[in-house]
Structures are given as C-alpha cells and as structure tokens.
Amino acid sequence: MTTAVIERKWHTTAEVAGMLGFGLSKTKMLVLTGEIRSVKVGRNRRILPEWVDEYVHRVASEAERWSA
C-alpha cells in the first residue's frame, strides 16, 4: 500500500510573514496593497506559493536594477 502525501496548496498571511521574515502587519499591508497577490476564501485571505515567489523575484530584480 502506498501513501499519498498531500502538499498544502495555500498559505495564510501569517505563514507568508514567517517565510519572508516579515511581521504580520507588514505582510498584511503588502497583501492589501496588492504587492503580494491573494484571494479571499470566506473571511480569510489565502496566498499561493507561486505568488510568494513572484513577489520575491520582483523585489530582487528591482534591487538588482538599482544596484547596477
């Protein structure tokens, strides 16, 4: 018998804050301003892992542009 591992598809704002090393308030502000994409599911915000990566790549490329 094989066991299937189901990976999480969504992250909460608090989980994303932990991943980025930001505070919850800063992360919520990034979500509210659209810097980090999210969807509302019921009363909660959820963020796809790809959207976190998208934000990180965008910020890193902006930093590279300014340092060049």
Image: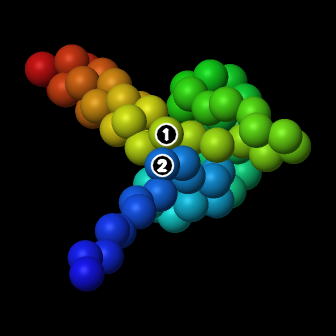
Image x and y of residue 5, in percent: 35, 68
Residue farthest toward the right in the current orientation of the protein:
43
Q: Which of marks 1 and 2 is nearer the N terminus?
A: 2
Visible in this render: residue 17? no
* Displayed quadrant of residue 60: top left
Visible in this render: residue 43? yes
Q: What's the distance in space between the residues labelled 1 and 2, CA to CA? A: 6 Å
| Residue on which disc 1 sits | 48
Left or right: where 32 falls relative to 10:
right
Q: Name the foreground residue: 6 vs 62.
A: 6
* Residue at disc 1, secondary structure: loop
Image x and y of residue 51, in percent: 44, 33
> Residue placed at 36% from the left, 30% from the top?
54
Q: How many marks?
A: 2
Image x and y of residue 11, in percent: 55, 52
Q: Name the foreground residue: 45 vs 67.
A: 45
Residue farthest toward the front in the current orientation of the protein:
1
Q: Name the foreground residue: 29 vs 53.
A: 53
Q: Are marks 1 and 2 in contact (CB under 8 Å)?
A: yes
Residue type indicated by callout 1: Leu
* Residue at disc 2, secondary structure: loop
**Local crowd at mark 1 within 10 Å, few (<14), some, or many (≥20)?**
some
> Residue placed at 25% from the left, 81% from the top?
1
**Local crowd at mark 2 within 10 Å, few (<14), some, or many (≥20)?**
few
Left or right: where 65 falls relative to 9:
left
> Residue placed at 24% from the left, 24% from the top?
61
Q: Name the foreground residue: 25 vs 67.
A: 25
Q: Mark on residue 9?
A: 2
